[in-house]
């Protein structure tokens, strides 16, 4: 008697599911508008801070709440990546299925949406994209919006069945960053404003020291965006990243709490960089006085 196939595999003679077409990492408003309303599409609003509860939303959008359940509040650091089981629970509560196409956006243009995309990528989800220019670009293109904040699991969304399969590499911890700073082949890029990098400006979290990781390079995330909050063309992104990395083949991005670092890492991904990483915790971790870690100031 023939043994049955392993669980999860089709039996002999069962047609395999047709592969889904690839999803670009960065999409524009026209791309999203042409697909809005499809049953396999999930649109997530990843706004933080002032954009966390927007007065309007893209129709059907659900809340990827980085200030809430989509960060680990058991950590003393803001915006810490949740444990895989917690992330899976929250994604399922948002209705994300294994075959969903997920588009994330935010109300600032490009600010926190790349963080959501980076988390999805770390969770093993490949069918995810960032909406270039976010909600402002959607509205500027004349597409409709719905009143009120995005839907949340409390609104009774149908549960999804996505399985989180963590990838090694998208996020780096403090020890990995310390090793990278001593590695001549790794560039550590800081996405904060230059006056925070130099220490000329105080940190918005007043308990943190001023300055930057010794040996890191300043590349404010705004320098990778246009004036209206969209990513620069890929050739320009490649040139700016090349200047900042100075030919070093490996890249780790840092910022204040691990959010805008993802703007840099996502840009590196767009240019074909093989393995950019994000320092989860970033300056909120390194800059704490109690760590005793070295801090540099100036340019």
Image: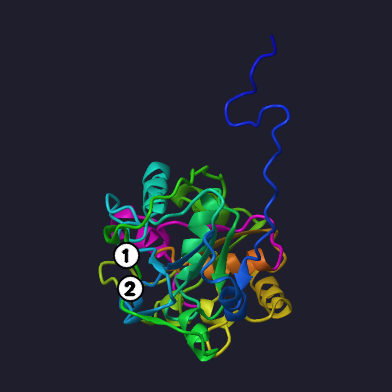
- Identify the image quadrant of residue 280: bottom left
Image x and y of residue 65, in percent: 35, 64
**Residue 190 vs residue 35, the one in the foreground:** 35
Q: How is the image coloured?
A: rainbow
Q: Nearer the viewer, residue 172 or 121?
A: 121
Task: Tell me which segment is drawn in magenta.
Answer: 271-299
Q: Is residue 262 visible?
A: yes
Nearest the camera: 286 or 161? 161
Q: Measuring from the top left, give residue 33's x and y in whole percent.
A: 56, 77
Residue under the image location 57 percent in, 80 percent down = 29
Secondary structure mostly seen in magenta is: loop
| Mark 2–mark 1 CB contact (< 8 Å) | yes
For mark 2, give the secondary structure: loop
Q: Which of the pair 189/58 is nearer the observer? A: 58
- Which residue is found at the position 57% from the left and 82% from the top? 230
Q: Quadrant of residue 57?
A: bottom left
Magenta stretch: includes residue 10: no
74 up-or-down from 299: above or below: above
Quadrant of residue 272 within the rendered picture:
bottom right
Q: Is residue 135 above or below residue 152?
A: below
Disc 1 secondary structure class:
loop
Residue 50 placement (x, y as % from top left) = 31, 79
Residue sitting at x 29%, y 71%: 205
Image position, residue 99 (x, y; %) = 56, 51
Horizontal side of 213 relative to 273 (left or right) equals: left
Q: Is residue 296 magenta?
A: yes
Which residue is labeled 1 in the image? 67
Residue at which label 2 appears: 52
Crowding at label 1, few (<14), some or many (≥20) Cα neighbours within 10 Å? some
Q: CA distance from mark 2 to mark 1?
A: 8 Å
User: Compared with residue 162, is residue 241 higher up or lower down, i.e. above or below?
Assistant: below
């Amino acid at each position: 008697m023939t043994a049955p196939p392993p669980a999860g595999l089709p039996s002999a003679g069962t047609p395999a599911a047709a592969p889904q077409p690839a999803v670009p990492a960065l999409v524009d408003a026209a791309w999203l508008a042409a697909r809005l309303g499809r049953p396999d599409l999930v649109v997530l609003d990843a706004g933080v801070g002032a954009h966390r509860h927007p007065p309007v939303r893209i129709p059907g959008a659900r809340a990827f709440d980085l200030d809430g359940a989509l960060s680990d509040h058991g950590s003393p650091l803001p915006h810490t990546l949740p444990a895989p089981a917690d992330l899976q629970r929250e994604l399922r509560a948002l209705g994300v299925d294994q075959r969903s196409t997920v588009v994330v956006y935010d109300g600032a243009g490009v600010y926190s949406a790349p963080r959501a995309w980076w988390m999805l990528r770390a969770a093993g989800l490949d069918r995810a994209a960032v909406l270039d220019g976010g909600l402002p670009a959607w509205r500027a293109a004349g597409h409709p919006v719905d009143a009120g904040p995005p839907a949340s699991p409390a609104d009774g969304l149908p549960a999804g069945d996505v399985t989180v399969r963590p990838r090694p590499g998208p996020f780096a911890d403090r020890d990995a960053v310390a090793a990278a700073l001593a590695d001549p082949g790794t560039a550590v890029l800081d996405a904060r404003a230059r006056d925070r990098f130099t220490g000329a400006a105080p940190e918005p979290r007043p308990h943190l020291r001023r300055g930057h990781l010794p040996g890191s390079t300043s590349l404010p995330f705004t320098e990778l965006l246009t004036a209206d909050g969209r990513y620069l063309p890929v050739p320009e992104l490649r040139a700016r990243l090349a200047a900042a990395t100075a030919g070093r083949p490996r890249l780790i991005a840092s910022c204040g709490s691990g959010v805008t670092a993802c703007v840099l890492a996502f840009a590196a991904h767009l240019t074909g960089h093989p393995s950019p990483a994000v320092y989860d915790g970033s300056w909120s971790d390194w800059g704490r006085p109690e760590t005793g870690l070295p801090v540099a100031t100036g340019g």
